[in-house]
Image: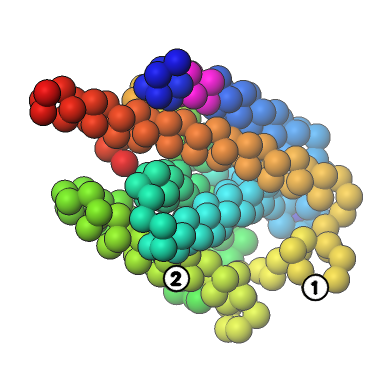
Amino acid sequence: MPDNGGFTVAAYIAAAVIYLCYAIYLVRGGRAKG
Amino acid sequence: MTPIEALERARRRSAVWIGVGLLLMAAVYVRALAFTPVEAVQGPAQKIFYIHVPSAWVAFLAFGILGVTSAVYLFLKDPRLDLFAASTAEVGMVFTTAVLVTGPIWGKPIWGTWWTWDARLTLTLFLWFVIVAYLVLRTAVHEPAQRARYSAVLGILGALLVPFIYVSVYLFRTMHPMPVVLRPGKPTLPGEMLATLLFSVAVFTLFFVALLWHRYALARLADARARAEAERADA
């Protein structure tokens, strides 16, 4: 079995950062000009 | 309760659901990484599937809603539809960004390259640029009815790409794998992996709904406050 767990960890962290940053941005008011 | 108070309440409630969505997403991470079997051929990298595919599903859902809302706006001219369409575009772009980031990280260990200009990848990148253009357009046009009309046309064009992206793996020679669940015939995924995928799709969809609800409440609030201010200035 290939040893590529580092890519999995990187992808999961990248997705978490994207979603978490956007959620925080939105809850803090976003840009909200429509 | 005034409309602004009702929107403030919607904003607070949707913020709670965003928190619930994040907690459930943590549960998806735990289930996918610790309690789902490792695929024998691809190894651990195959687990990127459980965040890549649900992100893509939600992005397609968002742009489907964007297309329908934009088309209905052109008939009804209701500004709320325009605000809702803009909200789906912004939230959908976040999910598409996650697709375009996690895809290459999966591609490198499996295909040996971060990126290839095949039909599905190129069209997904093109869709991302269309949605960026949609959001930039909204900041560039200041007259609300004109902004809404131009945005609706671009929103429909973006949404028309979605079915094309879906069937692109059948129409062209591509490195991107075929669907394993939404395909003619039964899903080809083993039970435990399918359960993790369906859990993840449900959680990502809930998270999307919470983000969309919150983004729409913020847009309506900004709109209602601007109207109230204009009325005060006129009085």
Type of residue at label 2? Thr
Type of residue at label 1? Pro
Horizontal side of A28 relative to B46 (left or right) equals left
The residue to which callout 1 is attached is B184
Mark yes or no: residue B228 visible: yes
Q: Nearer the viewer, residue B178 or B221?
A: B221
Q: Nearer the viewer, residue B112 or B81?
A: B81
State which chain disc 2 sits on: B
| Crowd around label 1: few <14 · some 14–19 · many ≥20 (10 Å) | few
Residue interval drawn in magenta: B8-15
What SS does tag 2 mark?
helix
Of the two numbered discs 1 and 2 in the rendering, the one whose residue sits closer to the viewer: 1
Locate residue A17, reporting x and y percent: 46, 34
Task: Determine whether B133 is above or below B225 in the image.
Answer: below
The residue to which callout 2 is attached is B122
Q: Which image quarter: residue A34?
A: top left
Locate residue B172, reporting x and y percent: 58, 83
